[in-house]
Image: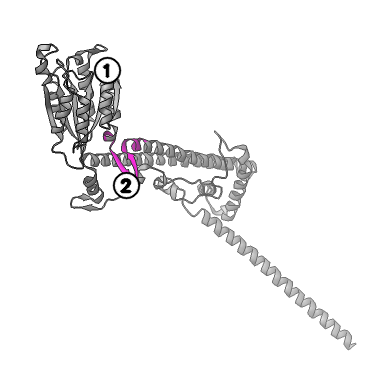
Amino acid sequence: MKKLHKLTLICIIFIFCNACSTQTETTKTENKNINQKESKKIDNEKQVAHSIPVTFEEIVKYPNGKYNRKYKVGLLDISKESEPIMKEVAHDTESNIKSADLKNKSNSEQVELYVHTMYSLLKQDITPFDKIPLQILEIGGFEEKEKSSTGTKGEQKNKENSGNYNIEILLDASGSMAGKIGGEMKMDIAKEAIQQFVSDLPEAVNVSLRVYGHKGSNDEKDKTASCGAIENIYTLQKYDQTTFRQSLDGFQPVGWTPLAEAIKKSTETFQSAKENDKNIIYIVSDGVETCGGNPVEEAQKVSNSNIKPIMNIIGFQVDHEAEKQLKEIAEVSKGKYVLANSAKELQDQFKETGKDITSRRLKAGGAQVDLNMASVSDKMKLDEYERKTKENIRSVQIAMKHTVTILHKDEKMSQQLADEIEKKINDLTEKQGKQVEMAYSHFQEKTKKHYEEMSRSIKSE
């Protein structure tokens, strides 16, 4: 009997302990589930903690979504291959919304929460301005330069090393330049091209104009006077439009062609040039030497002198004999010879032979950077990135609206709520698009001004 009582007592104790153990495990499991739910809720709240971005700066700073670059958008809707991804987005959206407890939220708050939740999942990366590969950034256009009493260190170094450009134009004013091309006198065409060329030069460049053969006539009796007619009508100085035009208007083509003597006298122009200056002679001629001189020999002598000028020759509607002589002049002086047979070609050749001067080049990172080309390139690059940014915003819009469609089809939201959410999405996209346009317009203007400042800086050196 005593044994039976002991056995009964042991069973009761065992059952009681087992019940306690089961209750403890159940409590632990329940607590774990509660903690997981709370943790998930916190994660979801973190994911949508940021307010919906509107300005370009806000959009850039806003974290990229979980599905960034994982879905593709067509012309009007999500691509078919991205449909599985969008179902995941819809599932995540619904899970996040459930954990947020919509019962205590107003209709507008629900709309805001849906839009924000979807945006936080779908937001795509946007390139900030300082990450766009612009040449203005490579050459330090936006950097604050270290100033000194005489300018920046870079400006001082450039002034010490680069020297200045001194340009003398030798213009053939012999009688043959009175010939016509397309009904216009060759001399008038040449004058207009020269005027345009010098007006496009940087302000710091010194210019000189020397004419030859502009006195007497083509007659033998006037040969001596004409061959001695070599005149520096615009002495080496900064370009002044009015004075230079007056110099051009002061002569007409009438005489012979003392090209050799004109080349010889051009050395007088550069006597005051500094050691590191770059001296260039432009010769515009339509014929060969006719005064008995040897222009190739004179060009060789001038080239070997201490001024070491480069001679760029423009043959203006020349014959074979003249072209041969002019080419030899360019060759011995390490210059360029080009042929022009029309007004346009003459202007183009001036631009071509003078591009190293007129393009305002800077050295940056060991490479020559043409400011004019860089400015155009950067504008195109900014246009391209503005388009990409707008496309990314549009992609997010389409993906969000597609998510709404999935949720509505799955009866996760009413038609009225879906319509209100889509309206909110459209309004957000429109605001973001306008802000992006404003930001890029401002940055384009800022970039343009910096290029203009750099160009002026180079001109003044």
User: In screen coordinates, is 122 left or right of 271?
Assistant: right
User: In screen coordinates, is 148 left or right of 439?
Assistant: left
Q: Position of residue 17 (x, y in %)?
A: 76, 77
- The residue depicted at 30 percent of the width and 24 percent of the height is 338
Q: Is residue 420 visible?
A: no
Q: Is residue 129 above or below residue 224?
A: below
Three-letter amino acid code of the residue under disc 2? Phe
- The residue depicted at 90 percent of the width and 87 percent of the height is 1
Q: Is residue 82 above or below residue 35?
A: above
Q: Regarding mark 2 in the picture, which secondary structure is present there?
A: loop
Name the residue nearer the viewer: 104 or 99. Answer: 99
Name the residue that disc number 2 marks. 142
User: In screen coordinates, is 29 left or right of 365?
Assistant: right
Name which of mark 2 and mark 1 comes first in the sequence.
Answer: 2
Query: Which quadrant of the structure image shows residue 454?
Result: top left
- Figure coloring: one colour
